Amino acid sequence: MKKNPHIILLTISLLLNILFALFLYLSINKGTFIPSFIVVVLISLILIGFVLLNKNIFELMPANYKNDINSKVKDNDTKIQITFNDVAGLDEIIDELKIIIDFMNNTEKYKRMGAKIPKGILFYGPPGTGKTLLASALAGETNSTFITASGSEFVEKYVGVGASRIRGLFTRAKKSAPSIIFIDEIDAVGSKRNNDNNSEKDQTLNQLLIEMDGFNSNDGIIVIGATNRLDMLDEALLRPGRFDRSIHIGTPNLKARFEILKVHTRNKPLDNSVSLSEFAKKTHGMTGAHLSSICNEAAILAVIRHKQKIGREEFDEAIERVFAGLKKKNPEILEKERLIAAHHEAGHAIIGKILNSGLVEKISIVPRGEALGYVLNFPKDDAFLMTKTELQNKITMLLGGRASEEIIFNEISTGAENDLKEATKISYQMVCNYGMSELGNRIYDMHLLKSTENIDKEVNKIINICYNNAKMILIKRKNIIKLIAERLLSNEIITKEEIDDLMKDEKEMCV
């Protein structure tokens, strides 16, 4: 068993102090003569021990932390069984990573051409899009040791702790090369340096920079970082020679969603009523993690309902669970609140149909999560670009619920909180990010502005225009609001076909 040097030093120092106290006791109480040189030697030893002890007490906590982290990472030093067959919807990125695989498996042919293996790959994009899965698959394809760590593991208040952990991480990677180091949430350790003088954070980042592109050779080691906040990373970390590849992993498109659903349902018995292509259309904007959760929820529901196969209704229910939250079994809702909710959701649905801003699949006033009601509305196409008119239509639909309340009850409620939050977010993006306001064709960084008065005015102007447009649309269709609300109050749920039937007399599709 390896002895801890800190414990040994502590024991020796304590023994020296006890011995010195004993000599003083004997000399004072029994008249024992102690030569001055012995006293000097003892005091010197005690002082040296005290200095060393204090130095190691300062380092004692970091050392223990380092041992803890080392043991955690060591447990994660494994050979991964996941391959690219387990990854779907990321074909372009997989093709790019296959070059890295060939580089690691056939190093000599690249060396003959003077090519060097990329030292780092940075995956960035929204949460749940498959960054960790891709890193695992890359390790599995190259038969490399996969060493995982989180950026937060390197952040401590003790100076030198994070840097020590970084050194330990790369030391283990060198011993088990070829290896892949995966640092999740790398923005926690690699965020931009500033004048705050956080010496621990800066030392940790500096050590990471040195290890990735320092004087030491890291042959056979690839560092993969993952972050949701690329804008927070230090520029020195992003330069070629450290992270040679920066790959954006966004939300999957229609084809990618279909492929992801196929992967997550390949070991699940599906009923003939299930159409994965249809559900791929209904899950616009959802990530791979959402789709995985939907497939799992559908399977759980089928088991609870004692079915042999997963049916269409289980998938529909699973989408609603992910979209709106869990259904409340015994909600205590006042009749007045149900009445407001019914007219509120009717307003959303009517504007969605009139402005043709999406596919209104369902209206419900069955409480789910924190919402008393909701409208399932899916975009018609996977558009990468949105026009100013399309964004205004989206805001108008969001404000349709509140406008409907004001028209029917001459009063507004707190039910539009989330709608207002989303409408405000889109409006700020239009002004600050897209140059879609009277402030001109430029971008505004809210963090650098001393005053946001002009921006706030433009945001209010956009929201007010959209709200007035929503009221104008709904005032003309007050009778349809009441028809839909009455149907909701009696049935709680209205399907797409029922909505079309209730609005069959509406010939105009835009205002």
Image (tube, rainbow, N blue to C red):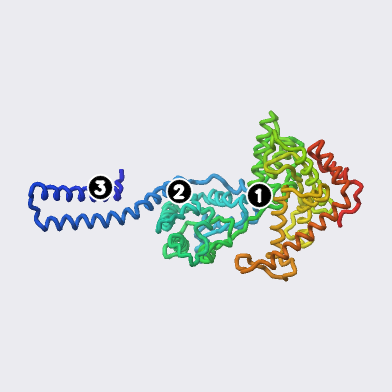
Q: Amino acid at mark 3?
A: Thr
Quarter of image, res 460: bottom right
Q: In the image, 254: left or right of 104?
A: right
Instruction: Look at the numbered disc 2 and give the secondary structure of its residue.
Output: helix
Whether residue 119 can be seen here:
yes
Instruction: Look at the numbered disc 1 and give the secondary structure of its residue.
Output: loop
Q: Residue at x 68, y 34 (%)?
A: 301
Q: In the image, 78: left or right of 462?
A: left
Nearest the viewer among 218 and 42 is 42
Tell me: residue 256, above or below residue 385: above
Residue picked out by circle 2: 73
Instruction: Look at the numbered disc 3 and give the secondary structure of its residue.
Output: helix
Q: Which one is in front in this view, the residue at disc 3 or the one at disc 1?
A: 3
Q: Residue at x 63, y 65 (%)?
A: 446
Distance between mark 2 and mark 1 Cα atoms: 28 Å
Residue picked out by circle 1: 287
* Among the two numbered marks 3 and 1 on one chain, the one whose residue lies closer to the N terminus: 3
Residue picked out by circle 3: 11
Whether residue 255 can be seen here:
no
Quadrant that contains the N terminus: top left
Q: Residue at x 14, y 56 (%)?
A: 39
Say few, some or many: other residues with alpha carbon within 10 Å of mark 1 (under 14 / 14 to 19 / 20 or more). Answer: many
Nearest the viewer among 194 and 282 is 194
Q: Amino acid at mark 2?
A: Val
Distance between mark 3 and mark 1 Cα atoms: 57 Å
Quarter of image, res 472: bottom right
Tell me: residue 15, above or below residue 195: above
